[in-house]
Image: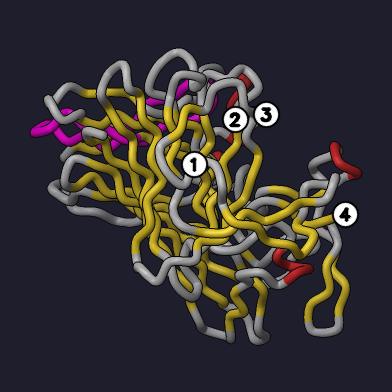
Amino acid sequence: MKLTESTLGQFPILELQDHSSGAFVSALPTRGGTVHRLGLPDPEGRIREVMMPMRTEREMERHRWSKGAMLAPWPNRIREARYEFDGKVHQPVKNFKPQGGHAIHGTVCFETFRLASRRPADPSFELTLDSKGWAGYPFPVRVSFRYQLADGGLALTFSLENRGKTRIPAGLGWHPYFRLCDSVKPCLLELPAGKKLSMTERAVPDGRKAPLGRFSKPEAIGEEFLDACMELTTKSKIQTTRLIDPGQDLALEVWQETGPGKFGYVQVFTHPLRHCLAIEPMTCAPDAFNNGMGLAVLEPGETMSAACGVRLSRP
């Protein structure tokens, strides 16, 4: 394994390379540990780049579409950028104006993480941030992300530690955009067992849940525009979402740990250009700081940790 450093304009890039398989993963430490590029071996050993990266310095500066973003201390939305916790009202920055305005994707996307020490042969590296809190989230935390290349795939471990003196609300998530070919239209999608959350016109859960329906078995995406969240219901400790390209006889598998404090939700979202699909493991539902769905509450000194990852396989 080799860890190298490069830059795109002002932005440093860390890349871990597995010379035995050719696999690689790169991250942006000054953009919240965002996963920038990912190359994995297919079943024949050829390296396939499977994520849509931010290609320019301008994209990185704006964090366009949150491509590859690591989400903490909450994923997805906080409705109207307002929530109440333990009798106090908090108002994070309203950084998403559509749908009436929300706080979206947590607070770490534009933070600078430090590289933890690692040995040269280590198949992983870790990025860590110690924060005293943010506007609307005044809680001291340590956030860490570990990136590991193993068994032909990528494994990511997310952790968030409460370093304050009071209990805190918390959630984690990942926002990658995946592609196997030039368009997602001919691709098939298969989702884990779960229930689809019904949403209001402001894209937050309205309290209703429905059977999954489409994509419980591999089904062509076609012209459908996806923007949906599933609450996973199986008791299995690992659940997998599959994106399949029949033309290449190739499947991309996004796996996630499930269970209390783990990635019990998955969001899927079609990029408007339809050239990639976001498959987003999350520990809680959109607006969990208000509706409590999957919300973790950490006591002082307590840590939540969850893992997810990606691999290529035959369908």
Q: Residue 171: give x, y in percent of width and height.
A: 59, 64
Q: Residue at x 59, y 74 (%)?
A: 296
Instruction: Give the magenta range.
Output: 5-25
Q: Residue at x 64, y 60 (%)?
A: 285
Q: Which residue is mark 4?
A: 80
Q: Residue 277: give x, y in percent of width and height.
A: 52, 31
Which of 73 and 44 lies nearest the eye of the viewer? 44
Q: Alpha-carbon distance for marks 1 and 4?
A: 31 Å
Tag nearer the camera, 3 or 4:
4
Residue 270 is marked as 2
Q: How many marks?
A: 4
State the image quarter where residue 73 is shown.
bottom right
Residue 62 is marked as 3
Q: Alpha-carbon distance for marks 3 and 2?
A: 20 Å
The disc, 1 or 3, on the residue closer to the chain's N-terminal end is 3
The disc, 1 or 2, on the residue closer to the chain's N-terminal end is 1
State the image quarter where residue 245 is shown.
top left
Kindly state the secondary structure of the residue where label 4 is placed. loop
Kindly state the secondary structure of the residue where label 2 is placed. strand
Q: Alpha-carbon distance for marks 4 and 2?
A: 24 Å
Q: Is residue 14 magenta?
A: yes
Residue 215 is marked as 1
Q: Residue 53: give x, y in percent of width and height.
A: 48, 25
The crowding category of the residue bearing disc 3, from other C-alpha atoms within 10 Å (few below 14, some 14 to 19, many at least 20), is few
